[in-house]
Amino acid sequence: MLTFFPAVGQRKYDYTKKQLFALSPTEVGSLISLGPAESCEFFHDPSMKSSHEGQVKKSLSITPLGSDNGYFVNITCLR
């Protein structure tokens, strides 16, 4: 389970607007096997197989910063 909070300033976050993104074991494997120049993206519908399906869509993208300097992690939630 990954937890994200939006930034409201340098090293300041809005803890009231928490977003969760649960990775499956297969997704965790994809994430930890990324090479230094590889990226990945995951799409989730938290209400899949319910009457609320399609109302919320979440995506998580991990892209390299370049020169082996780490990764940029971005979560998007569409309601």
Image: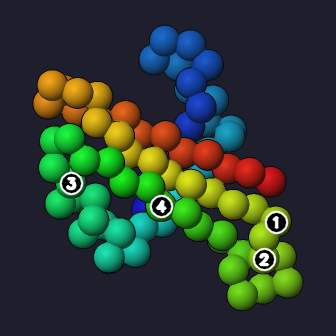
Q: Amino acid at mark 3?
A: Leu
**Residue 35, percent across and down?**
16, 49
Residue 3 at least partly seen: no
Spatial CA span between label 3 and label 1: 30 Å
> What is the quadrant of residue 68 in the picture?
top left
Residue occupying image coordinates x 56% and y 24%: 7
Q: Position of residue 63 (x, y in %)?
A: 35, 40
Query: Which of the marked residues, 3 or 1, is nearer the chain's N terminus?
Result: 3
Compute the Cα span from label 1 to label 4. 17 Å
Q: Which residue is mark 2?
A: 53
- Disc 3 versus disc 1: nearer the observer: 3
Give the residue pinned by disc 4.
Answer: 42
Dot 1, crowdedness within 10 Å: few (<14), some or many (≥20)? few
The tag earlier along the polypeptide, 4 or 2, is: 4
Residue 49 picture location, percent across and down: 72, 87
For mark 3, what is the residue? 34
* Upstream in sequence: badge 3 or badge 2: 3
Instruction: Of the two numbered discs 1 and 4 on the same chain, state the one appearing first in sequence.
Output: 4
Q: Secondary structure at mark 3?
A: loop
Query: Disc 1 designates what residue?
Result: 55
Q: Residues within 10 Å of mark 2 (few under 14, many from 20)?
A: few
Work out how far the residue at label 4 is from the one at label 2, CA to CA, in angstroms. Answer: 17 Å
